[in-house]
Image: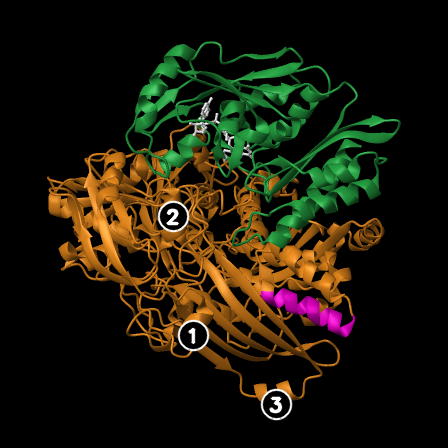
Chain colours: A orange, B green
Amino acid sequence: MTAHTKGSGTTWVGRAIRRLEDPALVTGQGRFTADLPAAHWVRFVRSATAAGKIVKISAPDGAHVVTAADLKHVKPIRPMLHKFNYVPVAQPILADGVVRFVGECIAACVAASEAEAEDLADRVEVTIDDTAPLVDARDALADGAPRVHAEAAGNVIVEGKVKTPDFDAVWRGAHKIVKVDARSRRQNATPMEARAGHAAYDAATRRITFTCTTQMPHLMRTAIADLLGFPESDLRVIAPDVGGGFGQKMSLAAEYVVLVWLARKHKSSFAWTEDRRENLIAGFHSRDQHVTLEGAFDKNGKLVALNAAVVANIGAYSCFPTTCGVEPLMAMAEMPGPYDVRHYACRARGVITNTCPMAPYRGVSRPVITFVLERLMEKAAAAFGIDPIDLRRRNLIDKFPYTSATGLVYDEASYKQTMEMAVEHIGLPAFRARQKQARAQGQHLGIGFAAFSERTGYGSPAFAARGMEITPGWETVILSVDPSGFVEARIGSSPHGQGLRTTLAQIIADEIGIEPQLIKVIHGDTDRAPYGWGTFASRSLVISGGATLIAARKIRAKLIKIASHMLEADADDIVLEAGSAKVAGTDRTITIAKLAREAYHQTHRFKGEIEPGLTETGTYDPPGTFSNACHVAVVEVDVETGRVRIEKFLVAEDAGRIINPMIADGQVHGGVAQGIGNALLEEIIYDETGNILSSTLADYLPPTAHEIPPIELHHIETHTEASITKAKGLGEGGAIGAPAAVINAINDALSPFGVSIDEMPATPQRIRAALRQAEKAA
Amino acid sequence: MKPAAFVRHVPKTVEEALAILAEVAPQDGRVLAGGQSLVPIMAFRMARPAHLVDINEVAGLDRLAVDGGKLVIGARVRHAAFHKSVADGPLGKLLAYVVRHIAHYPIRMRGTFCGSLAHADPASEWCLVAATLGAEIVARSKRGTRTIAAADFFQGIMSTALAENELLTEARLPLLAADAKFGFYEFNRRAGDFAMAAALATYRLVDGKIAEPRIGVGGAEAQPRRIAQAEATLAGQAPGDAAFRAAAEAAAKAIDPLEDIQTSGEYRRDLVRAVVRRALEHSA
Ligand SMILES: Cc1cc2nc3c(=O)[nH]c(=O)nc-3n(C[C@H](O)[C@H](O)[C@H](O)COP(=O)(O)OP(=O)(O)OC[C@H]3O[C@@H](n4cnc5c(N)ncnc54)[C@H](O)[C@@H]3O)c2cc1C
């Protein structure tokens, strides 16, 4: 992997300093949920049937087995959306008379160890009267299909529709209409650490401490306390080190509710560590969309209208807190991506089926819509007989702010510039020459591009537009300097590998003139951190970073005030740097530690002009900002076996101001790797009975280091007014662009064969099937 | 994903191991070698042996030597032992080439050659080597010792001629002639995964023509085996594209393909065609 741009200069922001969180993690000192000892371990009995009625559950005499009958007073999980014809459906904490997907929890078995709990689970017998399962969304939509939930007629539980006023007229007048019919199969985010929870009762305070591997500790506290009916103040939620989440750990696990219920009831500690099989079958899935997209172009190849139909298979229940609306509604809102198109129609449906519920996964919907839209661009270019890059040039947005057909406001970005940068660095003409030569020798190389916009760091108004009952957006940071000069930022966001402890420290360091290594960022503990939303939607650096900057500016102002008082100098003449306050142009200086002591222990000297203490709060709720990128994949397709090898991958990316280039590059690398998995390898497969066939990592195939090519990165920094730090989010972009680039490259390689691969993952089996069909037709 | 309870026995001699095995085999006692296949299936509780006869401390089973024109591989010899050539001539090179396709480094440090044969995964590289080269497999029990030919040993998916109370003590591979050529190719979706099809080819050249061809295919049928039809097309031909393509086509036709939800019979034949030809190209 090529070196990233090394930041330089006098600020900490922009420098590739090493991650402050890593020494503990790489020396085995990380603390994870499953490391905690517990008095009791829980194993869940899960449904082996996709749909049916529970006739009988029998457990060995005297065994500690919890079923729905014990949880009569616990509310079901029932997320809510106030728009888009959303039909709320209830998920009982343990299946209550009915099972709706393979993997659904039916009973909780408690024993002294994990192995014994599993022994007990083996001995619990569940009799289920099977009913016909609905696995594919198409079957669930069919006339006369049975209902997965009685409330949801037709099995559609969320439906968004838009049509801009002159759409029909523009459509009729279009020069050419190009169509893509695409499928993105089901995935699992597969974090390295699967889910885990540990609930412990504290006899002194009568509170429960619930440690779990989550991206949203405060939301877990709210949800669990609400469902069990006790005050949030009696529950402390801790997210210790979290081994990856990627969205899967945003959603409330029913299992967690059982653990807290057990700890309260028995006044003891109860733990559950999810195994990989449980995670693959029941730990939330993602993607699984069928999108039909038509583009209407004028005679110059300018896109004038888009018409989309989105069907998202959202599984058996709606996830908390985002609801299952995230996938279809995000597809509807953001389908036009980086392209200028004034007329738009879309119908997006979330269809309920007897499969594992969906939850957000890195990129949410945008890996799918970018794939579909970028396939459309390629097909349109072919239809017009022009170069696909040229077609994109004619359509990419280049005037800002830009208001999209769906009303989204795009701030300043660099859609065209990143694409031109990618074209230049990949050496397109030289590649075309090499491709031609290789083809003559029976070797099939291809190149694929994907341009996209990534909406990041959006605040509460953006979420409110979705009609969410729980409307996230803002973040709060409490920044304190204690009397010894020790700096601590307590943040509501909750990172799980993104390096936020480092990047926030860099932001603070520049404001108050001390080294980032001396700053501690505290998160993931509802007793220690202010209420916040957590990490998702490429938001934490933008929003929590913005709140951090606001708090740090206040601390800075106060330090200057105290320094001006002590040094008897004008506040305007004071600079904070290298751990001290200095009077500019003199040798008068005082350490920040001394100022901090003063702020606590010598406040009588302030004569009421300065408030005691050194703690400030910053809250930030921004409008949202779009980062952007262009991804390029160069692949070789083995036409005899269908195997795709990625030779090279390039990303030209603009995420505004880069706080730490090393961390930014790492985010892109990881996202691209997941995008490659999406394009080529990863697929959750159900058979027609609703049984899952990809329930181990021998069948569900995330890429390994071998499958990831060298990734070359280039950055442009467009500084936006939409973010006070000028940073845009970039957590998801890698995963958004890579699938489309890889699939376009495969299609480019296969262009002599007249096939079109519009399904992900493009497995060797699918590629060979397409080629075989073309061979037969020829 | 915790195994059901079991008792682990750690014999020090073959006789002791056989005695314990005789006693525990009727209660679902099993041999534990490298554990790289057995332990995962125990964790999934797809196997729940009540007793494990751990052979990792049994004296003498680590033998790896050429004896009477054969390479003798004892039951404790790990995959990693083959990372470098263990016998002069083509056989050592062949094994060193093939071993790199088995799983990943940490697994090769534990998993054993004989454990792979006993486990009999249809896609196992060692099973393909044993079937193609005509290995002899030595099975011992309290009642005696028998030597089983590879062609009789593999009996289906994870099914062999080994009785429950038998310990596979060693496998013997005939050395290849000094002028023998070999080629191997396997197809999988990720590096280190089990093969979706693999082929091993060996032959000699006599007056520029292929002699004594052996074409083995693994991962495509319930068990690896030599494909007589492909061998027949090769015998007496000059090596080259035409002969290799004909053999590949014959192999693709001859197999009875394993199918699953993602892999149709047609696709498996596509793969067999590709791997056989590529193994032959690799040999030339
Ligand atoms: C992630 C992963 C990837 C893998 N990929 C591959 C691959 O690509 N190719 C491949 O070939 N293998 C692969 N393997 C399997 C690996 O090679 C195993 O080591 C091998 O299959 C079994 O050898 P073992 O010594 O570990 O046997 P064990 O796991 O100890 O035993 C396997 C079975 O054989 C029996 N057994 C073992 N030794 C004897 C004996 N001496 N006598 C009688 N019975 C015996 C056991 O009772 C058990 O039933 C992979 C494994 C993993 C975990």
Determine if marks 1 and 3 fall on one subunit.
Answer: yes
Crowding at dot 3, Cα within 10 Å, few <14 / some 14-19 / many 20+, comes out as: few
For residue A479, side relative to residue B227 (left or right): left
Residue found farthest to the bottom: A169
Q: Which mark is residue B211?
A: none
Residue found farthest to the right: B207
For residue B237, side relative to residue A188 (left or right): right
Q: Residue at 78%, 51% (x, y): give it.
A: A427
Mainly helix, strand or loop, the magenta region? helix
Q: Which residue is mark 3?
A: A169
Q: Classify A25 as above or below B222.
A: above
Which span is picked out in magenta? A372-385
Give the mark toward the camera: 2 or 1: 1
Q: Chain of mark 1?
A: A
Q: Position of residue A244 (x, y in %)?
A: 43, 44
User: Between residues A253 and B202, which one lies in front from this camera angle?
Assistant: B202
**Amino acid found under the numbered disc labelled 3:** Ala
Q: Disc 2 or 1, which lies upstream in sequence?
A: 1
Q: Which residue is mark 2?
A: A279
Q: Position of residue A424 (x, y in %)?
A: 76, 54
**Amino acid found under the numbered disc labelled 1:** Leu
Q: Secondary structure at mark 1?
A: helix
How far apart, in angstroms, are the residues tagged by discs 1 and 3? Answer: 30 Å
Q: Residue at 65%, 49% (x, y): give it.
A: B269
Q: Which residue is mark 1?
A: A141
